[in-house]
Amino acid sequence: MAANRRNGMASPAHGLEDILSPAAPHPRTSLPNVATIVTTVAALYFGREVFLPIAIALLLTFALAPLVSALKRAGIPRIAAVIVSVLGAFAALALFSFIVATQVSELAQNIPVYQANILTKVRSLKETGVGGGIIARLSKVVERVGQEIDRQETPPPAAAPEKPREPVPVEIVSRERPLEVLQNIVGPLISPLGSAGLIIVVVIFMLLEREDLRDRFIRLVGYGDLHRTTEALQDAGKRVGRYLLMQLVVNIVYAVPIAAGLWILGIPNALLWGLLALGLRFVPYIGPAIGMLLPLFLALAVAPGWSLVLWTAALFVVMELITGNVVEPWLYGSRTGLSSLAIIVAAIFWTWLWGPLGLVLSTPLTVCLVVLGRHVPQFEFLDVLFGNEPVLEPHARLYQRLLAGDPDEATDHAEEMLEEKYLVEFYDKVAIPALLLGEQDRARGVMGDQQRRQVAESALVMVANLDDSAHEEAEEEDAPPAAEEEPDDKDPSREDETELPDGTDLSVLCTGGRGELDDAAAAMLAQVLEVQGTTVSKAGFADMEPANIRRLELETIDTVVVGFLNRDSIKHARFLVRRLKRAKAALRVGIVFWSQAANEDKEAAEKLARDINADFVAHGMVDAVVGALSNEPPIALKLVAKRRMRRQRTTSRKASAAST
């Protein structure tokens, strides 16, 4: 308190810099240079034989870690829990692969049986009006073009060629040794089996040495900030493990009805299509489409009519709608933290990098990268590029739209926020800070006059577009609350809310102080006052010129509120207060120094109000409304008292001079 008093004595505005100064700008996100990106991508591409098994093992470790922890809590030793979990997972994968291979072999043997139905449908397409016409026309066009080419490029007559000799059929019989036959069979399987064995070993050792690997990673990249590194590891494990587990549950919920429905419809190998639907749904976006096309083609082949195809398509569409709109939101909750575009771009990138396996691994790998960027400052650009969190704060996003001269999108942004906030909250927390960004750019000299006017005009258009929302809010204020909707005073969420006073029978003039941006802020304040039932008039900063103040119609005005976005306008504010109170002695005059640090340092605000002779000084929308609608009597000018004191001093000096 002593420090505050000393600062206050030094200057009336000193001590308010924290209130009037804008918030610190967000640090710029650093991007890696081109050489780093090229080197990293090249290493991943040419070293895919090494990195791909490690990536698969890492994701399987994330997926199996909760199961191992559960088995350990059940009393099973660590080594046994790891071995049981890994062998169980790979046994399930092996069983899945065996069933799929068996079903595919059975399907391949039955394909010639379906050939007749396929030919019948092709003939029916030719005989239909639309399809037959197109096919016939294309055939005739090709035939005519061929005839024309033959007619124009007729070769000259040549000598009769000699009669070619008939080829003699020759049969080559290769006698392979049993060892060579075995090598031809086993050879192609060595590479995938070796990779699978390597992955199993790596997963086992990662699960056994999980704590040691965690400590080594912390020592390597985050020893100086254990809290952030630990949070990153926990977030990555939680997100990836939850994603893989929930995706497996969703795929099972999706595949079981698909297999049962196809079996009921009579589609051969229904189990195969159900398993493929389960596996392909791990592939983002295109996986379900591929899983649907194969059963549709088989439905086209097994039945002569078209009804089976339609029923099969309807089954997949209904299950996709139910899964995407009901099951996934219920199970995923916050989902993966990736934007939709990021999932598509990641799928393209990892497919190009590592092939089909990269496509399957694209989403969980990108989740790991986003978590890394969210907690490690050096990789923050990954979270900005691929994360689903807004990269711009609401007020910065609104200012960008105003700066671009797009009031329609700014209005859409405002209406989205007004679904959850009141108008006074939106203006106080979003719109006024957006105008403060504009004032910062103007003060720094990076915003020209034309841009400043464009931002102000866009803001005024947005305020006008929000008139309907203001009227709806005013009607809600006028409507009596229902008994069951009465606010609960004990609700902790309402502790910070300030009840705005009723403005009925009050008349307020809102005006800007020194520029177009101040006028836009004054228009926002005026709209909030109208919601409270106040009779509001608006004026511009040009009306506050000394020659124009006397022209203002202040007879019916109770309070004048002047707003400034510039914190260095205290002298100008004192001048306006003096002029307005001279124009009407019974006028309340309030000054608003708009700031993001609203509702802070009440004592400094009251002291500043006394210094500039204002009835009140506010720094936010709520304080401005409360001050404008106050019933306190106006403060008289101190200037009159000072003049009287000067006259008294002059009279006393003259009297003393006469006596001497």
Image (tube, helix red, strand yellow):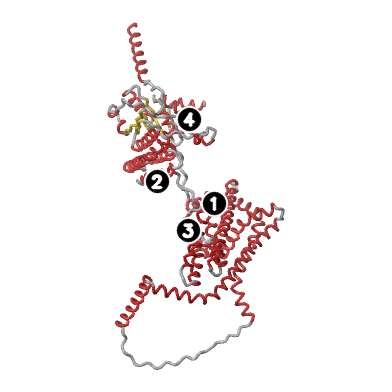
- Give coordinates of residue 132: x percent, y percent: 37, 73
Mark 1 or 3, closer to the camera = 1
Amino acid marked by disc 2: Asp
Element under disc 3: helix
Q: Mark number for residue 651? A: none
Q: Which of marks 4 and 2 is nearer the N terminus?
A: 2
Amino acid marked by disc 3: Ile
Q: Mark number for residue 344? A: 3
Q: Which of marks 3 and 2 is nearer the N terminus?
A: 3
Identity of the residue furthest to the top in this view = 659
The residue beneath circle 4 is 601
Amino acid marked by disc 4: Asp
Q: Which of marks 1 and 4 is nearer the N terminus?
A: 1
Residue neighbourhood size for the residue with mark 3, other residues' Cα within 10 Å, grouped as few (<14), some (14–19), many (≥20): some
The residue beneath circle 1 is 330
Q: Earlier in the sequence, mark 2 or mark 1?
A: 1
The residue beneath circle 2 is 412
- Give coordinates of residue 525: x percent, y percent: 38, 34
Q: Distance between the residues labelled 4 and 2?
A: 34 Å
The answer to whether 507 appears left or right of 272 in the picture is left
**Residue lying at 32% horizontally and 80% vertically, measured from the top left:** 149
Amino acid marked by disc 1: Trp
Element under disc 4: loop
Q: How far apart are marks 3 and 2 (CA)?
A: 27 Å
Judge whether residue 43 can be spotted in this image: no
